[in-house]
Structure formats: C-alpha cells, structure tokens
Amino acid sequence: MAVCIPLPSCRFRHRPVRSSLERQELFGRIAPVYDNLNDLLSLGQHRIWKRMTVSWTGAKMGDCALDLCCGSGDLAFLLSEKVGSNGKVTGLDFSKEQLSIASCRQGLAPNACYNNIEWVEGDALELPFSDGYFDAITMGYGLRNVVDKERAMQEMFRVLKPGSRVSVLDFNKSTQPFTNLIQEWMIDNVVVPVATGYGLAKEYEYLKSSIKEFLTGKELERLALQVGFSNARHYEISGGLMGNLVATR
C-alpha cells in the first residue's frame, strides 16, 4: 500500500492563479449548470469516459491522487473510490464557484470514502505540491484551457512519482476531416443551442476555437515525451470526438 503524506487539514485552500481571467470567469458563470449540461450534451456518456480516464491511471487503494482542473469533482470522486478511505485525493481548480459545488456534492454524498478529498483553489501551472508526491493524476477538459500546455505537462511530470501515470481527457483534435465536420456540427447544432437555453450561448461558443487551437493526439504524445515522460499514448474515444492521453513517468 502506498504511503500518503497528509495535506494540510483545511478543506478548501487558496493559491494565486496564473490563467486567462476571461476563461476563469467563464467557468465561474457556467458552474451552476455545468453538471446538467454535461449530462444533456453527452447523453450521459461523459460518465463512461471519466471512468475510463480514472482506470487508465492505475490508481489503487491507499494511493495519493490528484485531479487537476477538477471542476465540480466528477473525476475526484471516482479517484476517491479507487484509493479508498486510506488514500488521499486532491481536487485542484482555478474556479471558486466550481470548487464550492464540488464541496457541496462531497457533503451530500453518502460514500464515506469521499471524506478523503481535499479541494484546493490553485494554478495548474504552479502546483503547490512537492516533487514526486502523487501516485496518479487525472485532468478532465483542462489541458485545452490552460495558457501554457507545456508548463502544465511539466508540472504534472514533476509532482508525479516515478512509474506512475497521468490520464488526460479532453475533446479530440482529429486529423480526419469527416470527424472534424461532425464535431463542428455537434457544437453548432447541439451544444450551443442547448447552452442557449441556459443563457450561456457565448460561454459555449468558445469550444470550436479552443479545439482548433488544441494539439492533436500525436502532438500531445510528443509533448509528454518532450517534458520527460517515459512513454505516452493518446486514445481516441467516442468515434474520435474525444481523446485521452495516458503518460507514464
């Protein structure tokens, strides 16, 4: 069983955040309906993708795990179930609003192991943890939104223990024109119209441009190797609309 060094006992810690203020405010605005929209827009499939993401980390009972850009906590809760009451999970995000929702969900959940989760407001580019601290790291729909993707990968590499894995779920920037066409059609004709019903059309219109500016699977693999990971593989899921990078330190 892995030894987990206790983090400070406070439930919700604050750290300075270096990010796009506009993007930070965006996630604050969508926080109240974020979970409902995820369910609607993915027809519930995001729950399957997130379980796959956590499974790829290889997290086990007693481990210390980190969920970066944790949002309302879906991946953190799944990690908590993997590491159990003797393990420790840290959920870090730059949005106070998202963390507040995650903390409320934790308080209402019947699963006792969720008490092993600590929520931290902080910066994915300057992680407040020592080198080689975590046994597993997840990041769901966060790498695409950070201002410096290489720096974010370097930080994940730094705080991960040798031989451990990071698993990064996000929209896939496909190299296949047909897949790109479907993805853009879905955003224009499903995502934005549904978000409009919640008064969040502008908040979700950014998706197309953020995917275009993102890295392809091969580019993500190269980036992971470049910052020091020993191996990296990107998996296309859901017909190539989503992708998951798995990298081992």
Image (tube, grey):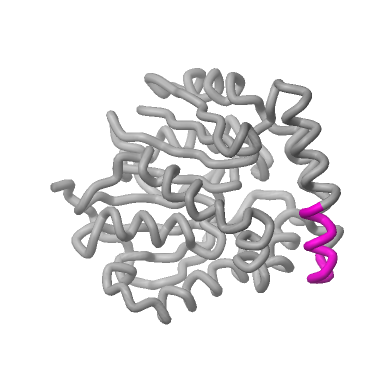
**Residue 149 vs residue 248, the one in the foreground:** 248
**Residue 81 vs residue 31, the one in the foreground:** 81
State the extent of the magenta-drawn residues as a range. Answer: 190-200
Is residue 197 magenta-colored? yes
> What residue sits 79% from the left and 63% below the top?
195
Tell me if 120 is positioned left or right of 89 in this view. Answer: right
Q: Position of residue 85 (x, y in %)?
A: 22, 64
In this view, 248 is above or below 226: below
State how many labels appear. Answer: 0
Tell me if 99 is positioned left or right of 89 in this view. Answer: right
In this view, 231 is above or below 147: above
In this view, 185 is above or below 227: below
> What residue sits 77% from the left and 26% below the top?
178
Is residue 124 magenta-colored? no
Q: Residue furthest bottom?
A: 108
Q: Residue furthest left?
A: 1
**Residue 228 vs residue 67, the one in the foreground:** 67
Q: Dominant secondary structure of the magenta stretch?
A: helix
In this view, 9 is above or below 215: below
> What residue sits 67% from the left and 45% below the top?
145
Residue 109 seen: yes
> What residue sits 85% from the left and 60% below the top?
201
Task: Please state, as top left, top right, bottom left or bottom right, where the C terminus lies in the image.
Answer: top left
Q: Which quadrant of the view contains residue 213?
A: top right
Q: Position of residue 88 (x, y in %)?
A: 29, 58
Q: Position of residue 12 (x, y in %)?
A: 46, 70
Tell me if 203 is positioned left or right of 107 in this view. Answer: right
